[in-house]
Image (cartoon, grey):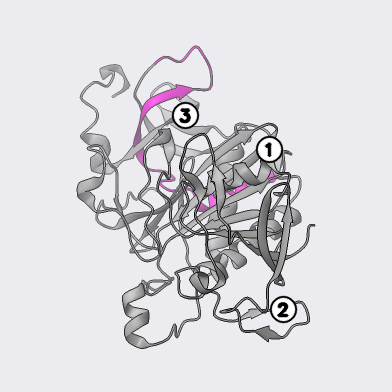
């Protein structure tokens, strides 16, 4: 386990493949007044320190990158905080190139100008939400196709431990329902919201997962693609109360009464991810149980658009079936008219969203 430290990229970061900086300069004063603010961070001795100024930070640097550093307890690895960036994954890439991001090290960005989601779609990334990148170990199950659903299962478990239960929409989206979901009962389109998602990138033998979670804002329905399954929403506590207040609400109150900030949430999630991973080895045989615990639409009929079958003999696109679970390979298991089949890729379209996209389905699968 690496040093439990917080590192502020106060000089920003040089570009990654373009003329735009990977991250803009971000001072301690900027940090203290931002959505990433750290209202009261414990130091290495267990006390607390004022972080608005530079006095509690130590200047450090290596391989052309400079940062301000302070010890923070409970982190599985160093956490870098950046200002506005192209994306947290771009920041992670620069740190990896400089040999500064060990396994379980992570990045938090204030906002993203070029955030990306599944299928490289643009991800709306204003300040106020969580945008992270976390380096994972290249061991089972993260060294296989199972990396995405396994990471999603761990994150869903971490969020549940944080008091915000979510569902994993295979392979890498996070949903939250207004009412408890029952196996075999599809939630209504207005009862469920997408609150986050993940994207994995492998570069030079290092695997990094980028995560976006809507905490104070989300994209309007008008900005979603035509065949969207559910609208976007913000992360809620168990009883339907937003986990975080918006900047306007906090400003009106004069203080953050709940004490939850983007950093304190990520501190809890990163520690929980590491703990869950460490406790449950070998994950290659155990993680599907965790995934199925949080799996959305279990026992429900869905359509898998752009289906990518695990066995090359299957060629039907799209495929209809009942969600049965996930396999140790990371594949989605569906009960179809042809028996139980497994798929390594595709877009899940549940409920009425599925009905609108079945015009070109194979009639023999009815």
Quadrant occupied by the C terminus: top left
Work out whether mark 1 precedes mark 2 in sequence or the reverse, and give the earlier one: 2
Which quadrant holds the N terminus?
bottom right
**Marks 1 and 3, how far apart in space?**
22 Å
| Residue closest to the eye, 20 or 179 | 20
Residue 272 among those drawn in magenta: no
Q: Is residue 23 left or right of residue 234?
A: right
Observer-side mark, 3 or 2, equals: 2
Q: Is residue 354 found left or right of 279 in the rendered image?
A: left
Quarter occupied by residue 279 = bottom right
- Magenta stretch in the rendered image: 286-315
70 w.r.t. 254: above or below: above
The local secondary structure at tag 1 comes to strand
Secondary structure of residue under mark 3: strand
Q: Secondary structure at mark 2?
A: loop
Q: Residues within 10 Å of mark 1 (few under 14, many from 20)?
A: some
Residue in front for this viewpoint, 152 or 364 = 152
According to the picture, the residue beneath numbered tag 2 turns out to be 43
CB atoms of marks 3 and 2 within 8 Å:
no
Say whether residue 74 is left or right of residue 22. Answer: right
Residue 206, numbered circle: 1
Q: Position of residue 80 (x, y in %)?
A: 62, 58
Mark 3 Cα-neighbour bin, 10 Å: few <14, some 14–19, many ≥20: some
Identify the disc placed on residue 282. none
- The reply to whether residue 182 is visible in this rendering is no
Q: Farthest top residue?
A: 313
Residue 155 sits in quarter: bottom right
Residue named by callout 3: 345
């Amino acid at each position: 386990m690496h040093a439990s430290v917080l590192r502020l990229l106060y000089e920003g970061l040089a570009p990654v493949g373009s003329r735009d900086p990977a991250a803009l300069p971000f001072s301690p004063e900027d940090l203290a007044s931002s959505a990433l603010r750290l209202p009261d961070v414990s130091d290495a001795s267990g006390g607390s320190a004022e972080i608005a100024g530079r006095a509690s930070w130590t200047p450090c640097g290596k391989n052309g990158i400079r940062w301000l550093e302070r010890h923070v307890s409970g982190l599985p690895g160093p956490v870098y905080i950046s200002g506005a960036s192209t994306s947290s994954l771009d920041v992670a890439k620069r740190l990896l190139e400089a040999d500064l991001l060990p396994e379980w090290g992570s990045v938090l960005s204030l906002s993203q100008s070029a955030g990306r989601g599944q299928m490289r779609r643009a991800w709306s990334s204003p300040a106020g939400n969580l945008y992270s990148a976390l380096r994972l170990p290249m061991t089972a199950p993260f060294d296989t196709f199972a990396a995405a659903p396994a990471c999603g299962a761990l994150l869903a478990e971490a969020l549940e431990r944080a008091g915000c239960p979510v569902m994993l929409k295979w392979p890498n989206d996070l949903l939250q329902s207004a009412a408890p979901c029952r196996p075999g009962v599809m939630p209504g389109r207005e009862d469920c919201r997408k609150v986050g998602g993940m994207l994995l990138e492998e570069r030079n033998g290092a695997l990094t997962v980028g995560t976006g979670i809507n905490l104070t804002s989300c994209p309007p329905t008008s900005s979603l693609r035509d065949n969207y399954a559910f609208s976007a929403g913000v992360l809620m506590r168990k009883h339907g109360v937003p986990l975080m207040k918006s900047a306007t609400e906090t400003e009106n109150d004069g203080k953050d009464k709940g004490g939850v900030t983007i950093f304190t949430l990520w501190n809890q999630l990163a520690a929980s991810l590491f703990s869950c991973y460490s406790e449950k080895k070998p994950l290659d045989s155990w993680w599907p149980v965790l995934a199925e615990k949080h799996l959305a639409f279990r026992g429900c009929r869905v359509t898998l658009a752009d289906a990518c079958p695990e066995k090359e003999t299957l060629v039907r696109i799209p495929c209809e079936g009942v969600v049965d679970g996930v396999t140790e390979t990371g594949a989605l298991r569906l009960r179809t008219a042809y028996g139980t089949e497994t798929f390594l890729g595709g877009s899940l379209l549940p409920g009425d969203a599925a009905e609108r996209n079945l015009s070109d389905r194979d009639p023999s699968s009815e």
